[in-house]
Image: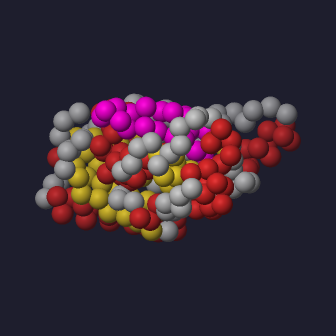
Amino acid sequence: MKGTWIAFDTATDIASVAIGSVGGAVVGRVIRGARQQAAQILPTVHDLLATANVSLSQVDGFIVGDGPGSFTGLRIGWATAFGLAHDRRLPVIAVPSLLGAAHAAGVTPVAVCYDALRGQVFGAIYDFASNRVTTLVKPDLFTIPELASRTRVRPVNVVGDGAERYREAVLTWTGREPVGLEVLPPIAGSLLALASLAGYPPDPEPFYGRPAEAQVKWEKSHGRPLPHSSR
């Protein structure tokens, strides 16, 4: 994966965009607030292109966070990446969103917990020892105690808005305060760093983590899966 790439992380309320070479120098920006993402994502792209002294025609591909995370946020990132890639038929690579946050945390092993409501988190645990990515617990829906029970490894930190929401459970597990996403460097930069190690061609839809409420109600009412539903 050579050349200049643009990465989008829009899985949470704290989104980011980054431009640079895969595994190389990166410039990133953060977009704070879910309501700002749709309005600010393209201006942020153009700002980064100007900062990097690169034109859009010189970009070689795009990277997106694959989820789990916000339905609306993930769709904004995906629509932007695929829209920009369309005319020149550029490649789009996906990287798991939780993995990007884990890498941005800069410690190992590390757990990532995005708030999934209903007392649950979208959680995973990763290890980055020896310049390799090892998934100790793959992304899924958990309570904090359920996630802790999946491995004997105790993470150095637990990061994410879900970790902050269930602070007491995190403290019981690790003895350390949870780390908020707002203190991490732009996660899109980590997606760029990870693309050559953990990237893959994206499926037609991101991994949302659980069906939307509307989908659940439709399937319950009709007694069958919603046609063309997401994962």
Give the quarter of the figure containing the C terminus: top right
Quarter location, residue 93? top left
Residue drawn where x is 61% and y is 39% of the image: 140
Give percent across and percent down for residue 149: 65, 38
Whether residue 84 is visible here, answered yes or no, is no
Q: Position of residue 79 (x, y in %)?
A: 44, 49
Colour approach in the figure: secondary structure
Give the magenta part as a residue range: 121-140
Where residue 202 sits, quadrant-wise, is top left
| Viewer-nearest residue: 176 or 14 | 176
In this view, the residue farthest toward the left is 53
> In the displayed structure, does residue 116 sit left or right of residue 135?
right
Q: In screen coordinates, is 192 left or right of 155?
A: left
* Residue for point 48% across, 33% down: 135
Q: Residue furthest front?
A: 175
Q: Residue 198, image x and y in percent?
A: 38, 33
Magenta includes 128? yes
Q: Is residue 150 magenta?
A: no
The image quadrant where one finds the N terminus is top left
Q: Would you say residue 168 is visible in this rendering?
A: yes
Q: Position of residue 31 (x, y in %)?
A: 41, 65
Residue drawn at (61%, 50%) of the image: 173
Write the residue at 44% across / 65% down: 182
